[in-house]
Image (cartoon, rainbow, N blue to C red):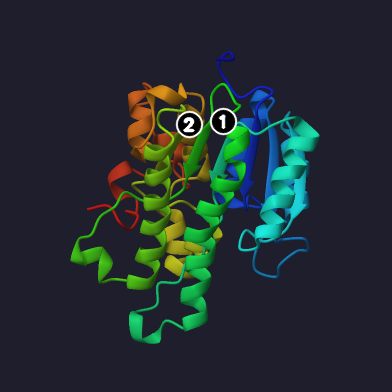
Amino acid sequence: MRGAGLAGRTVLMSGGSRGIGLAIALRAARDGANVVMLAKTDAPHPRLEGTVHTAADAVVAAGGAALAVVGDVREDEDIARAVDAAVERFGGIDVVVNNASVIDLSPTVSLDAKRYDLMQDVNVRGTFMLSRAAMPHLLRSDNPHILSLSPPLNPSPRWLGAHTGYSLAKFGMTMATLGIAAEFAEQGVAANTLWPRTTIATAAVQNLLGGDRVMRLSRTPDIYADAAHKVLTSPARELSGQQLIVEQVLEAAGVTDLSGYAAVPGTPDDALFPDIFLD
């Protein structure tokens, strides 16, 4: 295996124009990684900051190499194009980060069928198909990792009943990842999921979960990025098939003071807003 860090390694990510995905990309870039982003945001959105192009520029500024691929993880042709571009530009793929996700917390009766299909197509199918397309190249890597940003399976009525459509989509991401981990365990391809105990200050939290109040009670995307970095730099044969929690990953690495990750400095840990899916 190569030395510590992600220097020279190639990360293929779905989404990544902003928020958690961008934070993970920038953390990898600080090591000198190559980051390939497959995202739809070719032009600025009135309510969302950043595009795949500004994200790629930020990766380069942080010390990495970047390739922006404008496309949709729902489209097999776009996935194939992103994989081919990553291999042509950087010679292979070492890491897949399934970051792209759609959230709709509508209850069952009012969840539009198209929104249900969108969540299934992006969250579940996108995770499976991007991982599948990259697998031939991951199998040639000396430390291959798949990381999906999805929660531990938790079939408690509290979460299944809260937003059945969204829960199915996020749990589907996790099941796809765990299945891939089991299927490719002997070949040494790691596949894990990662989820936070608290809300993360992102556009989804601002626009859908709680506005300014919950944003103030969240942690920054950097905590997710630092935990992801710990996972992606671990030996693949030693860490796979796990439903990981961000804070536990950092604590296991000796990071016990998480106060620096608070969106509002000085906010006590016990005052932060808990994320969904964790009891």
Residue drawn at (39%, 77%) of the image: 106
Contact, CB < 8 Å: mark 1 with mark 2? yes
Query: Three-letter amino acid code at disc 2?
Result: Val
Quarter of the image with the N terminus in it? top right
Q: Looking at the image, is 45 positioned above or below residue 95?
A: below
Viewer-proximal residue among 86 and 196: 86
What residue is shown at x 50% (from left), y 45% (from top)? 220
Residue 194 in percent (x, y) is at: 41, 43
- Asked whether, in this view, residue 93 is left or right of residue 167, the answer is right
Quick check: 253 above or below 209?
above
The one of 23 and 154 positioned closer to us in this rendering:
154
Amino acid type of disc 1? Leu
* The quarter of the displayed image where residue 5 is located: top right
Residue at the image point whose x is 59% and y is 15% from the top: 2
Q: Which mark is residue 111?
A: none
Under tag 2, what secondary structure? loop
- Residue at numbered disc 1: 139
Q: Check disc 1: other Cα within 10 Å, few if <14, some if 14-19, many if 20+.
A: some
Residue 277 pos. (x, y %) = 30, 56
Label 2 neighbour load within 10 Å: few <14, some 14-19, many 20+: many
Label 1: element kind: loop
Q: Residue 189's mark?
A: 2
Q: Of all residues shown, which one is farthest toward the left?
A: 157
Residue 107: image quadrant is bottom left
